[in-house]
Image: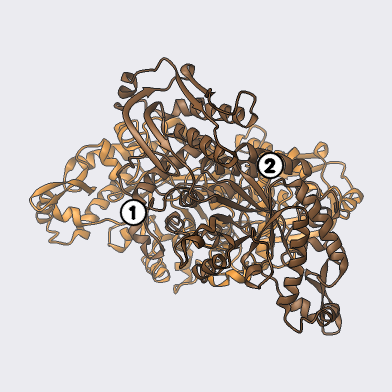
Chain colours: A brown, B orange
Amino acid sequence: PAHSPTHYSLLLLDWFQPLDTDSPYGSLWPLPQTVRFDGECYRLNQGRFQILHSSTSTATVGCGILDDAFRRYFGYIFSSSYRTTHRRPVSSGPEDKEKSAPVPEMLQLQVTICLADEIHVSKLRATLKAETVWGHLINKTDIIDFPRFTHRGILIDSSRHYLPVEVILQTLDAMSFNKFNVLHWHIVDDQSFPYQSITFPELSQQGAYHPVTHIYTASDVKEIIEYARLRGVRVIPEFDTPGHTQSWGKGQADLLTQCYNGEEPSRTFGPVNPAVNTTFGFMTKLFKEISRTFPDDYIHLGGDEVDFSCWRSNPTVKQFMESHGFGTDYRKLESFYIQSVLDIVSANRKGYMIWQEVFDNGVKIKPDTVVEVWMESNVKRELAKVTRAGFTTILAAPWYLDYVSYGQDWVKYYQVEPLHFNGTAAQKKLVIGGEACLWGEYVDGTNLTPRLWPRASAVGERLWSQENVTVLGDAYSRLTKHRCRMIRRGIPAEPMFVGHCAYEYKG
Amino acid sequence: PAHSPTHYSLLLLDWFQPLDTDSPYGSLWPLPQTVRFDGECYRLNQGRFQILHSSTSTATVGCGILDDAFRRYFGYIFSSSYRTTHRRPVSSGPEDKEKSAPVPEMLQLQVTICLADEIHVSKLRATLKAETVWGHLINKTDIIDFPRFTHRGILIDSSRHYLPVEVILQTLDAMSFNKFNVLHWHIVDDQSFPYQSITFPELSQQGAYHPVTHIYTASDVKEIIEYARLRGVRVIPEFDTPGHTQSWGKGQADLLTQCYNGEEPSRTFGPVNPAVNTTFGFMTKLFKEISRTFPDDYIHLGGDEVDFSCWRSNPTVKQFMESHGFGTDYRKLESFYIQSVLDIVSANRKGYMIWQEVFDNGVKIKPDTVVEVWMESNVKRELAKVTRAGFTTILAAPWYLDYVSYGQDWVKYYQVEPLHFNGTAAQKKLVIGGEACLWGEYVDGTNLTPRLWPRASAVGERLWSQENVTVLGDAYSRLTKHRCRMIRRGIPAEPMFVGHCAYEYKG
């Protein structure tokens, strides 16, 4: 009963009826900038396949990142699970074609590193990515590739639920398969403080769900950062203040604002207390440690959803407001606090990302600040405003993947165009990318991966490929194949609609 | 941003704000009929714990079902992963209590089998279930238990996506942890025919997604049935006809109705063709095989969503209608077909279940037929109608778990009361249970288990416990603990809301 799509139509925001036609681009995902297939076809043979540094490359044997990547992708191409399950034993056609295809003397994948930094990685990846359409056969193919946006992020949340390190590493694997290059690690929040600080060990000792089993040790963090680095992914930690800090208060006395019921202190605490000097001493030491632990040039400082009611109730805070001439405008107090934290982080020679409220409230931020737009209402106006003020920005609002719904919601994510807002060409250049956000209220190690993939893949192509890559039928055809490839590589990416993979996930 | 529940409130059908209070019933799920805790407390010690047959039991050593169950539950109680992760090393309190609790000389769980068949299993289970509240400590507890409804089913769909055998076995484990006792296996449908028939091997050879890797062999089916039996679960296969049969047509020529465009045959086929004798010869042989393969007393015959347009277009069918005096009432043709299949199945001494349309359309069905109500509109009226006609019925409509939505939808499933319809006490007795249905359009091995559990657990308690067990806060408290227990036993049951388990699922 009620199995056929038509029965569900009223429930769907965006229904997409998949076509039976295959994409001419096979399983390429995200679609490269230019692809030219040639009729020529070769058989792939493990013994006659090499990945090597070209003689003109600036990289040579001994470059750890490349050695690791060569080994990894050699495995993906020739792993036995792939080989044995990919062919349909009884059908004919592909096999015949395969048998008649010439096995070249030796097939060499020559990797050339010839430009600086960022570009290297993209070039490298483009080359490796070509592998993914081969199957047993390889078409003679020319691919030129580079990303449309430079910031292609996935947000994970390890505070609402603790995410085991294994789950984060698997996410990094899947990110690299989808050309995401930023892990936005929302590491702490109200619910728990799993980051183990060397300077303030009480924070996780008291604030984590469990002080031993539910924390990220220094070595965990190091492992995650290195695993990410080898896959071309930056790790940007978010330490969100002054709101979203309930768990901080458990291990750091007097950090949070004591709320009052009239004259009496209540049992509850509010945001970080900006009216006492100890707060800034604490933040200085903590962010110094964080700046050293996380090598990326940026730290995300949060700054969202600050509730003023507790500040309003507290006599010390009220006095502080008066002495600073803030009147009753608590946004000024918020700005005062955030400004101080930004200065602390700047002193550690780090750039910062912040949620849009910090910009909206008029806090003075450095020119290289990245403003993250997350509020669903007035996204276009916000993008216009932020870029008009000259700030770089990334888009998160349309890509809150924790909001699940019935049916093919990848279509909704895929159809977003980040530059559809009123602004000059210069303004549009300030939109450097976006993030697919998987907040953790209903997500932990049991369901994170199938909930994220392949839904986030839709965001991945939007951020990588050309603006005009928007044909749903073509995308569906490629993405279903790409999902099966992810499964073959160990990622339990959920199905997009009815169908099957040659190799199914067995749990 | 947008992390706190209040922000989402507009999106939620049923928001439930969990309380901080623990249930007095600990982690018991589903709640037994009566529970009496005693203050006395003992330590559990693996070396001093026995499960044995009581001297008055009619079962003795050598009873395979019990031997297997004893071993399994001994493992759940004393497995090392459970032991090592359950205690919080740094906190105090519970450990102190544990240390001071007396270790009894020998703790014996005596199992008595004293009644016939069905009841045995319930009694046995009730006894074993008591284990689940122990932790390291065991309270002196008296539990009397039995189910409110006898049919507590889970529907899985292996046609829209092939479900690997491992995934089905895991589902059976989870079912037993939640006292479900019927696996409704919707094994074939339009999309694929994975059941490998010995009599008609071409059905899966041509109709499965893959004729070797995506089928259920005779030995697969046997393994699943035996695994289920040892856990007190019946397996009822569904072979849905005359609609939902596109995949059948690939391996069985002339079974489906050829559709016409005016005078010309089109390229499409409709439901099973009831106008030719070959159809019933085929069905007789197939259902004879099915009746032997599946030992349960019931087979589900489907009968839902028959589309008449193809029948209308076909000249042979039209002629058949005339010669049988059906006029243009295709419901009469549908009834004629179903009647014939019911007779075939009856001849194999099997009972049958059918979807509600078969009853609605006035097909003559045997008194012991189970009518499954799945249409969301007018559920109460349908239940009244079916039971007024004297048929047993099970409820599926409010429990279509494939419809996912954001937030705590377990509340919606939990709040269903199957007997809230207008009818006499005798009518209500005919409602023998219900089924949580996880249709397969968007479900395969990658996401089946976390999507099913613990959402189906809410249905499980509704079907097991007393009608007045409806307090949401109490249920939330117990079910969050029960979810963690499922994880400890290897089931990746997804989180209900923010929080943690002592032992997290690592993928």
Determine whether A265 is above or below A87 in the image. below
Quarter of the image where the C terminus of chain B is located: top right
Q: Which mark is residue A224?
A: 2
B117 horizontally vs B107: left or right: left
Q: Quadrant of residue B33?
A: bottom right
User: Which residue type does callout 2 highlight?
Assistant: Ile
Q: Position of residue A261 (x, y in %)?
A: 81, 82
Circle 2 marks a residue in which chain?
Answer: A
User: Which residue type does callout 1 highlight?
Assistant: Gln
Determine whether B341 is above or below A191 in the image. above
Residue drawn at x 39%, y 43% is A478
Crowdedness of circle 2 by 10 Å Cα count: few (<14), some, many (20+)? some
Q: Position of residue B354 (x, y in %)?
A: 36, 54
Q: Earlier in the sequence, mark 1 or mark 2?
A: 1
Give the SS element for disc 1.
loop
**Residue underneath mark 1:** A17
Q: Position of residue A488 (x, y in %)?
A: 50, 35
Circle 1 marks a residue in which chain?
Answer: A
Residue drawn at x 86%, y 84% is A263
Q: Quadrant of residue B285?
A: top left
Residue A373 appearing in the image: yes
A97 horizontally vs A175: left or right: left
